[in-house]
């Protein structure tokens, strides 16, 4: 369980993803969802580290003994959101019941005309943000993603929606280019979405209380937020079963201030606030947590350097 999450191979492969895509699009979502059951069993049997990470996480959250059924439910929930990414990109939200909370607050931040930084986590479906784009076509959405981490999935999704692929800021290209692309997007009044719970290998982290034990969170997103000087809004696309999603926008700060003096304390405070909100939504929907590795033991020995170097090292999640 000490292996870093970036070292784990991508699940499935190009052929498996192509097969699921073909069955889903030509056979329909009901047939695609039937296939999720053998897929869930396959990954439960074959992906031991992920299975163990799921069990340990659920033990922290569920107030009852964790059984293989709970772990398979967790994996199935993840697989369902991956399948739905195909339909969300290929057909939009017409196959889904998506409720949106906090839209007025988001629009108030967006109305300032200087862009908005959306910070999310590996909970539920980040792809549900596309529902906002379809409802508000005047809003520009740029998503920061590492295309090299899951090349097969990236290729599949870009084949379904090339225009969506063009809106992605590729986190694998390196820190300075990402920072520049995000700043340019914000200057144009766009929403820039970034996952802020996972630290990449050798990335600067700080630990804060999380589900009963200190856990590491990356400092990069917060230093970026400080540099961008735009409103920060948390976003969660929770999967509620069937075809139901709940897209939640929660204002976090008008500006993130990380002063040079007491920088470590400022980072600790903002990361602790963020962790408490993540923890809240974990309790709301525990099977939506999709960090299938030992989140609490990630880079235990990483040195803390809460300075500008972390911005250059931050290459997305």
Image: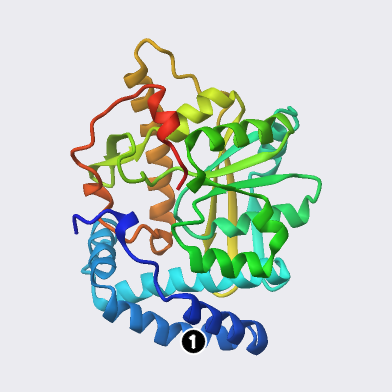
Q: How many marks?
A: 1
Q: Give neighbour class at mark 1: few <14, some 14-19, many 20+ (Cα, 10 Å).
A: some
- Quadrant where the image shows the N terminus: bottom left
Which quadrant holds residue 301?
A: top left
Q: Where does residue 42 sit, x and y in percent of width and height?
A: 34, 83
Please say which color scheme the image uses: rainbow
Hey, which residue is sitting farthest right in the picture?
Answer: 138
Q: Where does residue 134 sit, x and y in percent of width and height?
A: 76, 57
Q: Is residue 299 above or below residue 90?
A: above
Q: Where does residue 27 sit, x and y in percent of width and height?
A: 64, 89
In the figure, is residue 210 to the left or right of 36?
A: left
In front here: 80 or 279? 80
Residue at screen point 34% across, 27% down: 268
Q: Which residue is mark 1?
A: 35
Callout 1: SS = helix
Q: Is residue 240 visible?
A: no
Residue at screen point 65% across, 85% down: 28
Q: Where does residue 161 sit, x and y in percent of width and height?
A: 69, 65
Residue at screen point 68% across, 53% down: 166
Residue at screen point 43% across, 14% down: 259
In front here: 183 or 256? 183
Q: Is residue 29 above or below residue 98?
A: below
Hey, which residue is sitting farthest top in the picture?
Answer: 261
Q: Is residue 111 above or below residue 100?
A: above
In the figure, is residue 64 to the left or right of 219?
A: left
In the figure, is residue 261 to the left or right of 104?
A: left
Q: Is residue 111 visible?
A: yes
């Amino acid at each position: 369980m000490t292996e870093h999450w970036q070292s784990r191979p991508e699940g499935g492969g190009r052929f498996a993803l192509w097969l699921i895509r073909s069955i889903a699009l030509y056979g329909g979502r009901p047939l695609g969802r039937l296939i999720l059951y053998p897929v869930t069993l396959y990954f439960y049997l074959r992906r031991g580290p992920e299975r163990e990470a799921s069990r340990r996480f659920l033990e922290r959250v569920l107030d009852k003994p964790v059984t293989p059924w709970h772990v398979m439910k967790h994996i199935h929930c993840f697989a369902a959101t991956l399948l739905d990414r195909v339909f969300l990109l290929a057909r939009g939200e017409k196959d889904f019941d998506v409720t949106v909370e906090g839209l007025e607050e988001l629009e108030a931040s967006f109305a300032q005309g200087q862009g908005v930084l959306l910070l999310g986590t590996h909970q539920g479906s980040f792809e549900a943000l596309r529902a906002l784009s379809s409802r508000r076509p005047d809003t520009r959405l740029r998503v920061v993603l590492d295309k090299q981490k899951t090349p097969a999935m990236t290729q599949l999704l870009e084949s379904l929606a090339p225009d969506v692929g063009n809106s992605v800021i590729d986190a694998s290209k390196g820190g300075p280019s990402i920072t520049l692309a995000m700043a340019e997007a914000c200057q144009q009044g766009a929403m820039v979405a970034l996952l802020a719970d996972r630290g990449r290998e050798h990335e600067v982290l700080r630990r804060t209380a999380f589900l009963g034990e200190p856990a590491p969170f990356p400092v990069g997103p917060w230093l970026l937020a400080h540099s961008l000087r735009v409103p920060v809004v948390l976003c969660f696309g929770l999967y509620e079963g069937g075809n139901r999603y709940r897209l939640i926008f929660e204002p976090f700060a008008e500006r993130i201030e990380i002063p040079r003096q007491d920088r470590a304390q400022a980072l600790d405070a903002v990361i602790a606030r963020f962790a408490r909100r993540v923890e809240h939504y974990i309790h709301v929907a525990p099977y939506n947590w999709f960090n299938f590795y030992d989140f609490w033991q990630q880079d235990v020995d990483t040195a803390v350097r809460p300075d500008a170097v972390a911005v250059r090292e931050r290459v997305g999640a």
